[in-house]
Image: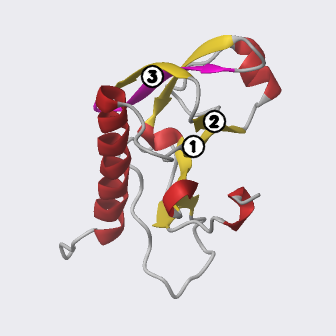
Amino acid sequence: MARSIDYGNLMHRAMRGLIREVLSDVAEHGLPGAHHFFITLSTGHPGVAMADWLRDRYPDEITVVIQNWYEDLAVDADGFAVTLNFGNSPEPLYVPFDAISTFVDPSVEFGLRFETHEPGDDEDEAPMAEEADGESGPREAEVVSLDKFRK
């Protein structure tokens, strides 16, 4: 078997590293200017920690906003922890970076989307690399359109 460079997986890791770096900076210094984040994540992903009532309400995915009110933002090598306000109820969350499907900062029209690529969707394309943890299957990364987040 010929060895090859796995650009898809390398790009995926680099994009998750960008998210880790941005959130680490915000944890240390706070949000600068008008910056804020919409982060969509899979609530069923292994390692996501959230209140049972919140997971029951959002069994597949949830979009959280880090903007005006958040507490205890902490970032580690695998994900981030934050306390957010859900209907006047502060709730702690832990989100592995691999659970994130979109990361958007609408203040500067920046966004990332991590899409699942189903085998056989396009047989002419080279197969995508699987996630390092093997849990979420092959994925492809692309820039997300910000139109759905505009008011």
User: Which quadrant of the view contains residue 32?
Assistant: top left
Quadrant for the N terminus in the image: bottom left
Query: How far from the left and from the top, in percent, is residue 39?
Result: 57, 43
Residue at the image point whose x is 69% and y is 37% from the top: 62
For disc 1, the marked residue is: 39
Residue at the image point whose x is 75% and y is 13% from the top: 88
Dot 1 or dot 2: first in sequence order is 1
Task: Work out whether 11 lies above or below 59.
Answer: below
Query: How far from the left and from the top, in percent, is residue 93?
Result: 55, 20
Q: Are marks 1 and 2 in contact (CB under 8 Å)?
A: yes
Amino acid under disc 1:
Ile
Extent of the magenta region:
77-85
Task: Work out whether 143 lies above or below 56.
Answer: below
Quadrant for the C terminus in the image: bottom right
- Considering every residue shown, the one lying at the far left of the view is 3
Dot 2 or dot 3: first in sequence order is 2
Separation of residues labelled 1 and 2 (CA atoms): 5 Å
Query: How far from the left and from the top, in percent, is residue 25?
Result: 30, 37
For disc 2, the marked residue is: 64
User: Which quadrant of the view contains residue 81?
Assistant: top left
For disc 3, the marked residue is: 81
Separation of residues labelled 2 and 3 (CA atoms): 12 Å
Amino acid under disc 3:
Ala
